[in-house]
Amino acid sequence: MDFSSRNYKYYKEVFKNVQKPFAFVDMDMFNLNIENIIKRAGNKKIRIASKSIRCLGLIKKILSSNSIFQGIMCYHPLEAVYLSENGLDDLLIAYPIYYEQHIAAICKEIKKGKTIIAMVDLPEQAEQLNRIAEQENCILPVCMDIDMSSDFGSLHFGVRRSKVSTTNEAMELFHQIKELKNLRLDGIMGYEAQIAGVGDLTDSRVKNFVIPLLKKSSVKKISRLRSEIVKGIQSEGHQLKFVNGGGTGSIETTITESCITEVTVGSGFYSPGLFDDYSNFRHLPAAAYAIEITRNPINNVYTCYGGGYTASGSMEKNKIPKPYLPEGAKLIETEGAGEVQTPIVYKGIEKLKLGDPIFMRHAKAGELCERFNSLLLAADGKIIDEVKTYRGEGKCFL
C-alpha cells in the first residue's frame, strides 16, 4: 500500500468534523506494522507489551491477527486483573509487586484458572509473594528478571532494573524460589533496554558512532549471560515454560538466541517519535493526535490549544512530542509543547487558519492514551470506529 498520500490534506479531510484535541490510529498503517513485526520475529512467539498499547480493543485485535502473538506483558497487577476479567490470559507482570492486596487480587484470578505471572529479582519479593499465595491457597507462577545492562569502565550502558546480573546470582535466587512451596518458577526475562530502547540516528555524530559499537559489545554479553542462566536452571531438572527477551528495537538480535522462546513487542505497533531513530528497521507512524489552532500571533506562528504531552524518562529533547503534519511544522525551542498552548512555526504551502488542526506524534507509544479517553480508528480515508483507552474505561493503574 502506498502511503505517500497520507499528508496533511488527507487527515484534515478524514477528521474534518471531529472536535479537537483527539487521538487516532491509522489502521492501514497499524495493520502493516503488525505484518512487518511478524516478519521480524522469525519463528519466535511475540508477547504484546500492553504498556505501549493501553487500549483493550487494539490489544485484542493484535492477538487475534496471528497465532504468533501469545500472551501479554502487563505493567501493573491490577491491569493484569482487568485484562483477565476481560477474557485475556497468559499475563506476565513486567515489574515486581509487593503490596499485599495486589498480590491477593492476582491470586484470585489464578484460582479461576487464569495464568498471571509475577516478577521477582529479590528474595524479599519472592517471600512476600509466597506468603500471600499461601494465604490465598494457590500456586503463584513467577518469572526471574535478569539485569541485561553492560558496564564499560565507568559507563553504565542500560537501565538500573534487576538485582540479578550474574549467573551465580540467578542460581542463588532460583534455589531460594525452589524452597518456597507456593511459588513456581515459570520463566526468565531479560530486557535489553540499551538495545531495544536506544536509537542510533540521533542529532549527535558522536553518539551515532558510539552507540552501535556499545550495542554490538552488549549483545555478546547478553546472549552469553541469558544462555548460561537457562542452562544452569535446566541442568537441575527444572523446565522453564518461557524465556523472554527484547523489545521493538532489538528483535533482530534477540531472536538469534536459541534459548529465547518469545520476544516482547509493544511500541512498534504505533511507532511513535522515538522509533524514527533506528537504522535497522522502520515502521509506520500509525498513531498521532491533533490540536487546534486558536491563535496567529505573528506571521508563520500558529498557537494551538493544549498539546504538551511530554514522554517519561530522562528529560531530553527527544521526549517532546513532534509536529507531524503539515510537513515542515516545528516547535519553538524556547517554548516547546505546553500544557494549555503550543506555538507552532510553519512556513509551508498549506494555508492554515484558526480552527485548523496541527497533527502531532508522541515520543512514546502507550503514554499518549493517558491523555485521551478514546482513539479514533481510520482506514481508507474515513473513520471506521472509536475504541476506548484504559483512561476511557476509567482505569488509572499508575
Image (cartoon, rainbow, N blue to C red):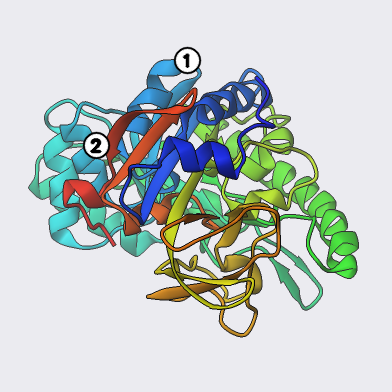
Q: Residue at x 41, y 59 (%)?
A: 355
Q: Is residue 237 visible?
A: no
Tell whether 295 sits left or right of 369.
Answer: right
- The residue sitting at 46% across, 23% down in the picture is 69
User: Horizontally, is 11 left or right of 212 in the view?
Assistant: left
| Left-right relation of 65 to 371 | right
The residue depicted at 42 percent of the width and 27 percent of the height is 382
Crowding around mark 2 (Cα neighbors within 10 Å: few <14, some 14 to 19, many 20+) is some
Tell me the amino acid under the disc marked 2. Leu
Q: Residue furthest top?
A: 67
Residue drawn at x 37%, y 60% is 123
> Could you tell me residue 223's position as x and y percent?
72, 42
Residue 66: which disc? 1
- Under mark 1, the amino acid is Asn
Between 73 and 199, the one lying in front of the other is: 199
- How many numbered discs sit on the rendered protein? 2
Looking at the rendered structure, the secondary structure element under dot 1 is loop
Q: Could you tell which of marks 1 and 2 lies nearer the N-terminus?
A: 1
Q: Badge 1 local density, few (<14 within 10 Å), some, or many (20+)? A: few
Residue 145 image position (x, y, % from top left): 49, 51
The quarter of the picture where the C terminus appears is bottom left
Comparing 386 with 325, the one in front is: 325
Q: Secondary structure at mark 2?
A: helix
Q: Identify the image quadrant of residue 185.
A: top left
72, 104: nearer the viewer: 72
- Residue reaching furthest bottom? 334
Q: Which residue is mark 2?
A: 83
